[in-house]
Amino acid sequence: MAEMILPLMELFESDKASAWEGHIFQAACAWGRALAEALLQAWDDKLLAQKPRGWRVVGFRERTVLTRFGEVRIRRRLYLDEQGRARFLLDALLGLPPRQLAVSVVVVVEKVIEVASEMGYRKTGEILASLTEGALSTMSVWRLLDQVGERALAKEDVEGEAVYKRGERPAQEGEEAPERLYSVRKRTGYGAQSRHRL
């Protein structure tokens, strides 16, 4: 055990001994990121041997995965299937959504969004950076919130089009949505009502 401790002591200056926990946390996060990159690379290599017949490799692409130990850059193979569509077998294996910052820890995402909605992304990023010794940065929080906002706007557009263009009423939890949505309005003058299909 003493042989392990002595080399470790050389990594940290004695005048910074009070920050030992932070140093170890940073080292552990860096080791975790390196291990994750190696593991994901090995999986991508294994998937190459199992690729469907007719698929071909056309190159490599990089992306970022946000983990509890920081951002992990992964390099994975890009395939073209029989119809010429781009595919990433590693993304499919990991369940990573396309074209966005992938987040491996859903609970962390929910809490980051909750805190950032109260105090803004910059302050949230500063707090997370200090709590994680820089493993999660202000830029990580900004990218995450940008992705969540884009998804929310896209969902809102789809729901708005369903209601205002096609007259569909979104189903409330626990009830079935009617086929069409009608509105009742009073006519001025005689007080008669008319029914209009939206």
Image (spheres, helix red, strand yellow):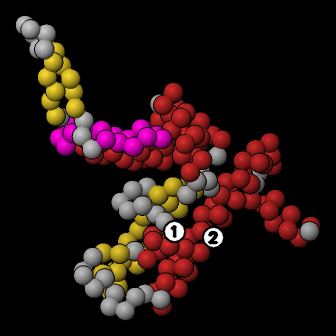
Instruction: Identify the mark nearer the N-term, 2 or 1.
Output: 2
Does the image show residue 20? yes
**At x 30% / y 81%, what residue is drawn?**
80
| Residue neighbourhood size for the residue with mark 1, other residues' Cα within 10 Å, grouped as few (<14), some (14–19), many (≥20) | few
Q: Furthest-right residue in view?
A: 2
Quadrant position of the C terminus in the picture:
top left
Q: Position of residue 62 (x, y in %)?
A: 41, 68
**At x 45% / y 71%, what residue is drawn?**
92
**Of tags 2 and 1, which is closer to the observer?**
1
Q: Is residue 69 above or below residue 60?
A: above
Does the image show residue 16? no
Instruction: Look at the image and say whether residue 106 sits in the magenta stretch.
Output: no
**Residue that carries the numbered disc 2 in the rendered image:** 35
Residue type at numbered disc 2: Leu
Quadrant position of the N terminus in the picture:
bottom right
Q: Position of residue 77 (x, y in %)?
A: 40, 78
What residue range appears in magenta? 163-178
Tell me, for residue 94, which label it has, or none: 1
Residue type at numbered disc 1: Leu
